[in-house]
Image (tube, rainbow, N blue to C red):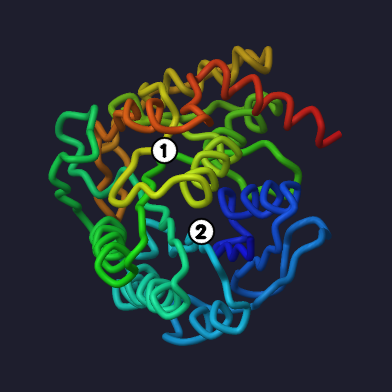
Amino acid sequence: MRIAITGANGLLGGAAVGLAVSAGHEVLGIGRGPCRLAPGRFAWADADLSDGHSVERALLEFRAGAVLHAGAMTDVDGCEREPELAWRANVGGTEQVARACRALGARLVAVSTDYVFDGTRGGYREDDVPDPRGAYARTKRCGEEAALVIAPDAAVARVAVVYSGRRGAKPTFATQVVEKLSRGEPVKAFSDQVVSPTLAESAAEMTLELLLDHDYRGVLHTAGATALDRVDFARRVAARFGLSGEIVPVKTAEVKLLAPRPLRSGLDVGRAAALLRSKPLPIDTALDRFHAQWLARG
């Protein structure tokens, strides 16, 4: 299969490139700027989701048979500062991808986020009505619709709080917990944000399976299987790494964040668990893999 993966410099996209190459597929990684992945047997396209054309052109030239659209502008406060750029990247970029998939007759899985919900109750299922707050959330929700409306064979895979311990992966809350506690520094964590942390490699396995092995159309929650608050998440990371130190609970309202955050945005992943061979991971299993990745960095 000729598989293209946008956001290939990112956590989920980068993991998906490695998995797809290992499975013997012909792979095009698409990202903004030079490739930051370890060298491998895949092609690379430097393309910008926000420019209106370069990603679509790269997909058409590659003649993709399936596309995992993991690229996005994910800086939540940055989206709030620059809402027009957020729209061009998260809605216009998804339109580019979906148009190319329509022209090519290609299968599309577009990655989205728990932020499409307002976070008032948690445990959200796929058929719950989204109520996004803030520029990032609204543009991601509109991107979901762009994928499902334009591409005839499309699914949307929602993830949350993605993290990875592999070498070269960008910093996340989970990696900051490890690094700060290792240096003897305190870690601040939101006690009132309940989330579904998602190991990037697990999300890559689920979304690639959804892309290649299923004809499921619509929304599927492919996050981690455990919903917990960020303090508990930080404590579990610390325990798995054998780290002691101070984890300081704080309320979201105490930190003057520019964009709103959903407080209870945990995702119900029962449908994915029933559909996929690659199951959503319970937190302890995911942290075992995260710890092994970290040790393999050397």
Residue in front for this viewpoint, 94 or 294? 94
Q: Position of residue 206 (x, y in %)?
A: 51, 39
Q: Secondary structure at mark 1?
A: loop
Q: Earlier in the sequence, mark 2 or mark 1?
A: 2
For disc 1, the neighbor class at 10 Å (few under 14, some 14 to 19, many from 20) is: many
Q: Amino acid at mark 1?
A: Thr
| Left/right of residue 118 with respect to residue 75 in the rendered view | left
Residue in front for this viewpoint, 144 or 174? 144
Q: Amino acid at mark 2?
A: Leu
For disc 2, the neighbor class at 10 Å (few under 14, some 14 to 19, many from 20) is: many
Q: Position of residue 104 (x, y in %)?
A: 47, 77
Q: CA distance from mark 2 to mark 1?
A: 14 Å
Q: Can residue 161 be seen?
A: yes
Residue 222 marker = 1
Vertically, is 256 above or below 276?
below
Q: Can residue 193 be seen?
A: no
| Left/right of residue 225 with respect to residue 168 in the rendered view | left
Vertically, is 272 above or below 49?
above
Residue ID at (35%, 29%): 269
Residue ID at (34%, 73%): 82
Vertically, is 79 above or below 209?
below
> Which of the image's four quarters has the N terminus?
bottom right
Q: From this viewpoint, which residue is outermost toward the right? A: 298
Q: Secondary structure at mark 2?
A: strand
Total numbered labels placed on residues in the image:
2
The residue at which mark 2 appears reads as 68
Q: Position of residue 70 (x, y in %)?
A: 49, 58
Q: Position of residue 119 (x, y in %)?
A: 20, 37
